Image (spheres, coloured by chain):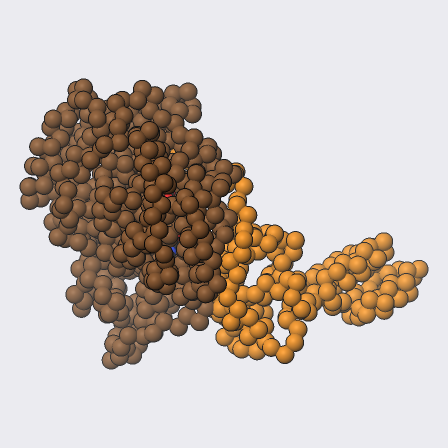
Amino acid sequence: MIKTGAQILWECLEQQGVTTVFGYPGGAILPAYDALKYSNIHHVLVRHEQGATHMADGYARASGRVGVAVATSGPGATNMVTGIATAMLDSSPIVCITGQVGSKLIGSDAFQETDITGVTLPITKHNYLVTHASEVARTISEAFYVASSGRPGPVLVDITKDAQQSTCEFDGKPVAPQLPGYRPDLSPTPTEYKQALELIHSAKRPVILAGHGIILSGAMDEVRQFAERNNIPVGLTLLGLGAFPASHPLNLGMMGMHGEAWLNTTIQEADLLIAFGMRFDDRVTGSLKTYAPNAKKIHIEIDRAEVNKNVKVDVALVGDLKAILRELLPKLKSQERREWLAYIDRLKGDVAVRDIQNLPDNGHLYAAHVINDIWRQTLGSDTVIVTDVGQHQMWEAQYFKHEHPRTLITSGGLGTMGFALPAAIGVKAARPEAEVWAVVGDGGFQMTMSEMATMVQENLKVNIAIINNGYLGMVRQWQEFFYDRNYEATPLLSPNFVKLADAYGIRAVAVTQRSEVVPTVEMTRKHKGPVLIDFQVEQEDSVYPMVAAGAALHEMIRRPNPLEETAADA
Amino acid sequence: MLNTFVVYVENKPGVLTRVASLFRRRAFNIDSLTVGRTEKPEVSRMTIVVDADRDEALRVEANLYKLVNVTYVENITGKSSISRDLAMIKVSATHGTRSDVLELANVFRARVVDVGPETLTLEITGPEAKIDTMLEVLRPYGILEMVRTGVVAMRRGGLKTDEAAVTAAPETGAGTAAADDNVSYSV
Ligand SMILES: Cc1cc2nc3c(=O)[nH]c(=O)nc-3n(C[C@H](O)[C@H](O)[C@H](O)COP(=O)(O)OP(=O)(O)OC[C@H]3O[C@@H](n4cnc5c(N)ncnc54)[C@H](O)[C@@H]3O)c2cc1C
Ligand SMILES: Cc1ncc(C[n+]2csc(CCOP(=O)(O)OP(=O)(O)O)c2C)c(N)n1
Ligand SMILES: [Mg+2]
């Protein structure tokens, strides 16, 4: 049948299982929008194209399916850049479709012409410029394949207006990708497996470093069996949270800059690190010179370019984590490791950091309380937390205990403020049955709060918890610690968030007392529509512990007047 | 140390940019890069010479493989291979010096490709070092202009380069931890 490139586009997206796209129209993408009338795909109209990319990203991270964002050429496409870079650094599979000026006009500085494939070259896993209707089908099939296979990532497809408008024969059959150079399916050699097992069996003080790759690989069960069989304690990266149950006796919590002190000490004293799908980010290692000095290292990782990038390892198993663990498990011996585990337990007792949790109500509202209360109230229900970037993000990681994968969605690698609200909308679109909370700072919220309108227009219930401390808190904390408390450009004036939400037709309430937190969370959960809560918290609280950039992992800045310290925290 | 990579890429628009952009993005130092056609019309071949230590060279290779349009990469440094560079050198050659220059050209098996009233233009092909040496000896006569193509390289022996190592598991190697100034001091 003869079809336009635009018609083929939507048909191919449907073939890929796409039901929802997030986008914003404009001249160069209008033919595609016009052809939406032939498609069952639901289009969510965003308020800014950055929002569309974060929604697609949230959609992908919540569901494991590829998220799709659509924009016009020029400013529409460039507005996507931040969202694409965010997805790139966190290995999130999204496909961005942009309109481009007519192919005859390319290079002429035509109206709204931007070389978006050039702009996004270093921040996409791959990108395409499509100039003929006949290339649409194959390109879409390749884009989805590249985005979702191997180490996932964003792919951009730029389609000229004439490629959307012109016609070609299309038989509706799926087109196979033709990618001779793309080999996402590496696997280790038998010797490498053997070496890894030898290191594990002879280790006295091993730790598993559990990363985002576990979730991407779907290897949660294998990791659990692995840890339990050999009694290896598990520390998680920020993006790994949920990959191993928080309540598991072998779980040591989050590692790194704002991680648990006992875990960082454990890593420093370990004789073997076993990294599962994590990339030794500098927030995780602290100073590389002093990182885990006595430990051998095994790195299980799908991307060969990550091996030996930051940390020199002794054995690298390159391939899909789940497949590799399935290979290792039958040969993995059962070991007890009583001494090592008892030692770590003592560390926990000595250096408990979840201090603030035990603070009696002194009339102040602390972000940690708010987050911990939200956790307690939602315990056992299907809840996804999406955070923005800053102090509240770290408190969430510390005080919300994630039992399941894909229940914490956050921008880790790029640390993109403004991520939470749009990503939460994407999460809710992917998982309508889940309870979705955006936990967001007063600063970050103001970067993308216009997406409240998208949420209302789409009838999506996302609960918004603003952790309002009147500051760009995380930057203020750095100024407090490293710049003599010179709070330059960090005190932040905000609008009346309750009135603002009201203008959007969103129920809203401000909370200033600890005693109000639980009833307000309860009300929010019961209310049919979205609710915004403006939690006006202690303004100059800091996130502890903290490894200063460049310091060794175990040299942590601790809360100056430790409150009653105990490890017996839920 | 200089590492020579043979890289096969799909012959498509923009692929050279992708490769060049990778080197810039990852701060690898290109010494020379050549690209040209191969026996297969759909494939182009690059020879890339990179100044890198062993670990960096492994990362160059791994990152090249990540480019979707790159079909094959081999670091042929230290392997039995032939590499050639071509140079055209315009040398000042006056009455007094012309025969000296011609004699030197002969010694290096360079060809005279153009003769001007006061110049000779020589063409020489060979390993880089040979051309470097010839340039050194010509320099006193006055090099007016010089252009080099950059190295092209090929494995010796019966197998084609991309067949020779296709089965070899990509090496992961033992790297060195990056220096501490790689710590990001941003919030
Ligand atoms: C303000 C702020 C503070 C932060 N503080 C901390 C902190 O204290 N602690 C912390 O941990 N993080 C922290 N981060 C996050 C940090 O910057 C990184 O984003 C995070 O550590 C990365 O985690 P990761 O390596 O598990 O995930 P990713 O960066 O997503 O890496 C995943 C890895 O898994 C690999 N992979 C993917 N699929 C597979 C597969 N199928 N099989 C095998 N491997 C696979 C990928 O190739 C990749 O190397 C902070 C971020 C911000 C913004
Ligand atoms: C887009 C963007 N700009 C700047 C930063 C640097 N930055 C990191 S955290 C932070 C402060 C965030 O403030 P807020 O949203 O109020 O959260 P808080 O830290 O107070 O919880 C800033 C400015 C960033 N991460 N992203
Ligand atoms: Mg704030």
Tell me what residue is drawn at x 67 percent, y 69 percent.
B81
x and y, in percent, of residue B119 in the image: 83, 62
Tell me what residue is drawn at x 22 percent, y 49 percent.
A404
x and y, in percent, of residue A271 in the image: 45, 44
Left or right of residue A391: residue A109: right
Judging depth in this view, the residue of A494 and A110 nearest the camera is A494
Q: Write down which chain is painted brown.
A: A
Quarter location, residue A530: top left
Chain B, chosen colour in render:
orange
- Is A79 situated above or below B83? above
Look at the image and tell me whether residue A29 can be seen.
Answer: yes
Tell me what residue is drawn at x 74 percent, y 67 percent.
B126
Left or right of residue B111: residue A211: left
Judging depth in this view, the residue of A457 and A182 nearest the camera is A182
x and y, in percent, of residue B134 in the image: 80, 60
Look at the image and tell me whether residue A96 can be seen.
Answer: no
Quarter location, residue B122: bottom right
Image quadrant occupied by the C terminus of chain B: top left
- Is B60 situated above or below A339? below
Tell me what residue is drawn at x 17 percent, y 46 percent.
A383
